[in-house]
Image (spheres, rainbow, N blue to C red):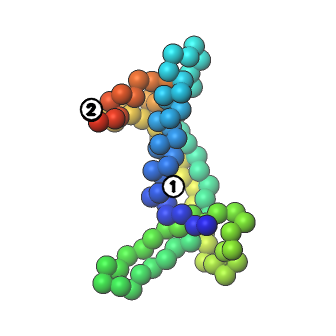
């Protein structure tokens, strides 16, 4: 199963938000300064009218043998901060991340 890079980053953002919520009220919190990812990606170039490139994260054990010659290792180092530029602490109040009901 391959996943688009944008979807992977969206899921990572969601998991970090969940970790912040889960740690609310805890005595010990972790500061997330950076997140280092090493991914195997396949690059697909489209020749359609909306031409562009897509990056697919290749899952381990997937039937990607045919694609293996076209995969690349990408290393990303992401800084973690809130929308106001503050460092992320698990257990932070994240109520500002959700729309008011």
Total labels: the figure holds 2
Q: Is residue 91 left or right of residue 69?
A: left
Q: In the displayed structure, would residue 76 be above or below residue 85?
A: below
**Tag 1 secondary structure:** helix
Q: Where residue 69 sits in the image (x, y, percent)? A: 66, 79
Cα distance in 3D space between marks 2 and 1: 26 Å
Which mark is on residue 37?
none
Relative depth, front residue between 81 and 99: 99
Q: Residue at x 58, y 67 (%)?
A: 2
Q: Residue at x 27, y 33 (%)?
A: 101
Q: Is residue 86 left or right of residue 79?
A: left
Q: Determine if residue 70 is in view.
A: yes
Judge the density around disc 2: few (<14), some (14-19), many (≥20) Cα neighbours within 10 Å. few
- Measuring from the top left, give residue 30's x and y in whole percent: 57, 25
User: Mark 2 highlights which residue?
Assistant: 100
Please tell me whether mark 2 or mark 1 is closer to you in this view. 2
Vertical comparison of 31 with 37: above or below: above
> Residue 71 placed where, x, y %?
61, 72
Q: Which residue is mark 1?
A: 8
Q: Residue furthest left?
A: 100
- Where residue 80 sits: x, y (%)? 46, 38
Quarter of the figure with the N terminus: bottom right
Please name the residue shown 48% across and 28% down the image.
Answer: 21
Asked which secondary structure carries label 2, the reply is loop
Q: Please indicate, yes or no, whether residue 69 appears anywhere in the rendered image.
A: no
Q: Neighbour class for label 1 at 10 Å: few (<14), some, many (≥20)?
A: few
The structure residue drawn at horizontal position 36% and vertical position 28%, both measured from the top left corner, is 95
Q: Nearer the viewer, residue 88 or 97?
A: 97
Of label 2 and label 1, which has the lower sequence position?
Answer: 1
Q: What is the residue that sits farthest to the right in this orientation?
A: 61
Side of 40 where 92 appears, left or right: left
């Amino acid at each position: 199963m391959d996943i688009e890079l944008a979807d992977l980053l969206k899921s990572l953002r969601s998991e970090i938000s969940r970790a912040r919520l889960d740690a609310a009220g805890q005595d010990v919190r972790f500061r997330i300064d950076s997140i280092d990812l090493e991914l195997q990606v396949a690059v697909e170039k489209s020749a359609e009218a909306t031409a562009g490139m897509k990056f697919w994260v290749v899952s381990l054990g997937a039937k990607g043998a045919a694609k293996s010659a076209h995969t690349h290792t990408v290393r990303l180092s992401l800084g973690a901060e809130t929308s106001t530029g503050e460092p992320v602490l698990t257990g932070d109040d994240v109520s500002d991340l959700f729309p008011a009901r």
